[in-house]
Amino acid sequence: MDSLLLPIQVVGMTPKKDKSWKITVETRELTGEEASILVDNFQNEGWMQFSPNQEMPAPPNEPADAGLKSPSERLRVHIYALYQQRGAHGSFNNFYATYIERLCDGIKEKLDE
């Protein structure tokens, strides 16, 4: 994975319920290669380094972990909310298994043979 160091301007900050922050930044015009690196890493975790026009310290060598949920974890959370909304009848594990099976069947129907 290529790394990228760009000059940015922080243009917005919004606190979220889980005490994380949504930070909006703007860059100068990107080259095709820079844009490609960002697009290829859309929704991946990484490090963002900010220094107000001073000498930049070296970024950490270890992988970034923003504590974000995986797509499957996010899906499970939303299925649980649906389970609660529908009255939480029976066990959630049964509801989850049945719901996932229906999702899989719907996807299989869309696949070419």
Image (cartoon, rainbow, N blue to C red):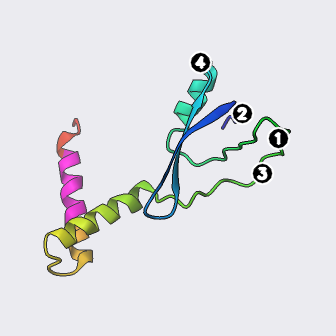
User: Between residues 104 and 53, which one lies in front from this camera angle?
Assistant: 53
First-in-chain label (4 vs 2)? 2
Provide the secondary structure element on which disc 4 rests.
Answer: helix
Q: Which residue is mark 4?
A: 32
Is 106 on the left-hand or right-hand side of 80?
left
Work out how far the residue at label 2 is from the one at label 3, CA to CA, in angstroms.
15 Å
Q: Which residue is mark 2?
A: 5
Numbered range of the magenta stretch: 98-108
Amino acid at the residue labelled 1? Met
Between disc 2 and disc 3, the foreground one is 2
Q: Where is 52 relative to 84, above or below?
A: above
Give residue 63's position: percent from left, percent from top: 68, 53
Tag 2 near tag 1, CB within 8 Å: yes
Quarter of the image holding residue 35? top right
First-in-chain label (3 vs 1)? 1
First-in-chain label (2 vs 3)? 2
Residue that lies at the very extreme toward the bottom in this rendered image: 90
User: Between residues 38 and 18, which one lies in front from this camera angle?
Assistant: 18
First-in-chain label (2 vs 1)? 2
